[in-house]
Structures are given as C-alpha cells and as structure tokens.
Amino acid sequence: MKAVILSAGQGKRLLPLTADRPKCLLPLAGKSVLGWQLEVLAANGVELVTVVTGYGAGLVDDEIGKEYVKRLGLRVETLYNREFATSDNLVSCWRARSLMEGDFLLINGDTIFEKKALERLLAGAREPVTVTISRKSAYDADDMKVRLDGERLVRIGKDLALDEVDGESIGMILFRDRGGDWFRRSLGKALENEAARRRWYLSVIDEMASEDRVWTCSVAGLDWQEIDFPEDLERAEKLVQAGRLGL
C-alpha cells in the first residue's frame, strides 16, 4: 500500500504559527503533524509515502530525513508543487497523478487520525473509491460535509444545506483497482477549465459521485482532528498526549 499526503499549503489561518513553517510541520508532543501521520501509516503496513510539498518544501525534506522517520521503515519521498501559491489542492493532486495506480491512500496533510481509523478503512473498503467519514451532532460552514444514500456518497462539499448533511469527510480516501485511473481522468477533465486550479480536489470527487458509485467508510467514534485553527492544534495536542492515536 502507498499513500499520497497533500502538504503544499502554508496554513494561513494558523498564523503566526505557520510564519516560518508549513502547518504539516507544526509540533505535537515532540513530533510534527506529518510525523504522527507517518507513524500511523507505518503501523498499518503502508510502505511508500509521497508528500506533495509547496510552502516550506525544504523544511519538509529535512523532516523526512530525521532519524525517527527513518526508523519507521517507510520509504518517504517528496514531490514539489511549484504552483502552490496560486492554486488549491486539486493542482497538488494533478501533480501526483503518476502515482495514482493500483491501491493508494490520498490524505490531507492537516489531519491526524488514530490507528484504528485507518485499519477500518483498509479492512472494509473494496470499492474503487472510498471516502472516510465521521459524524457529529452539528456541522458548521467549514466542515467538508457529505450526503449519503446508505453508504454511497451522493454529495460532498462545504456548501451543502445543513438539513441534508449525513456526516463529514475526515480528509482520507482509499482508491482501489480502477479508482485511481478514474480520479486521474476526472482531474484532467476538470483542469480543462482554468478556474479549476483554485478548486479543492473534493469537488472532483463530488462530480465523480454523480457519475458513478463512490462509497464511504464511517469511522464515527474513533479519534481524528483536522487542524485549521489554533484551537484545533490544541485539541490535536491533547489527543496525542493522551495516547489516543493508538501507537
């Protein structure tokens, strides 16, 4: 199994914490956000990780060269997105399109999640595209919300009407079999329009769900945390310090 981690952004909503580093390198209990992601991936048998970089790319290269990363037994590489300052993560995905063959994980670089969440996804997902979701009692404008038909994804986006929401994406997708090729072709089609360079890659997943079956895997009840604001970083710190990642 291989993984692609999208870590090209600075994380401006976390300033001044990200003034001198990308948010994937923010510290959590002695390691970086990226470091904890790599720990969970290694614990689940992932062998190759490609980190798509942009802002502070050299610092990410330094991080994956550290001894604690080498001890994980992972092969970790970086892939530079030179358009990171003028585009969104759809372009980062397109930059990594040559890696989208066979089974692979696509993970947002600002999300930590416990070992069991990835275990559940890998064990249960057999469809070409499976979006990992969770659930809570209320959602806000910043949540990447989902609407479902059973376990099938119907819509995904931040602008879904709240009375239509069945959960939220945690920022981790598993592609199997033809899924990677389908995603790669859908990205290329989207980029025929120049405006797509400012779109999230999940807008392409939303379009794919309207064309064919995209599945979901719920990890409700398991721990994860997206890190967009300083208070998110504080919650992530507490999860890690409490040993809630299961490592």
Image: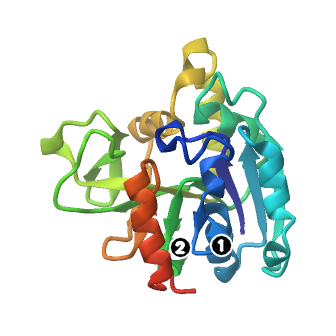
Compare residues 151 and 105 and report the one nearer the observer.
Answer: 105
Residue lying at 31% horizontally and 76% vertically, measured from the top left = 221
Residue 127 can be seen, yes or no: no
Residue 48 can be seen, yes or no: yes
Is 143 positioned to the left or the right of 237 in the image? left
Is 204 positioned to the left or the right of 182 in the image? left
Is 77 positioned to the left or the right of 128 in the image? right
Q: Position of residue 247 (x, y in %)?
A: 58, 86
Compare residues 48 and 208 and report the one nearer the observer.
Answer: 48
Q: Residues within 10 Å of mark 2 (few under 14, many from 20)?
A: many
Q: Residue under label 1, please give it.
A: 41
Residue lying at 49% horizontally and 81% vertically, measured from the top left = 241
Q: Amino acid at mark 1?
A: Leu
Give the vertical position of 127 relative to 221 (above or below).
above
Q: Position of residue 30 (x, y in %)?
A: 64, 74
Q: Position of residue 42 (x, y in %)?
A: 70, 77
Q: How many marks?
A: 2
Q: Residue under label 2, please give it.
A: 118
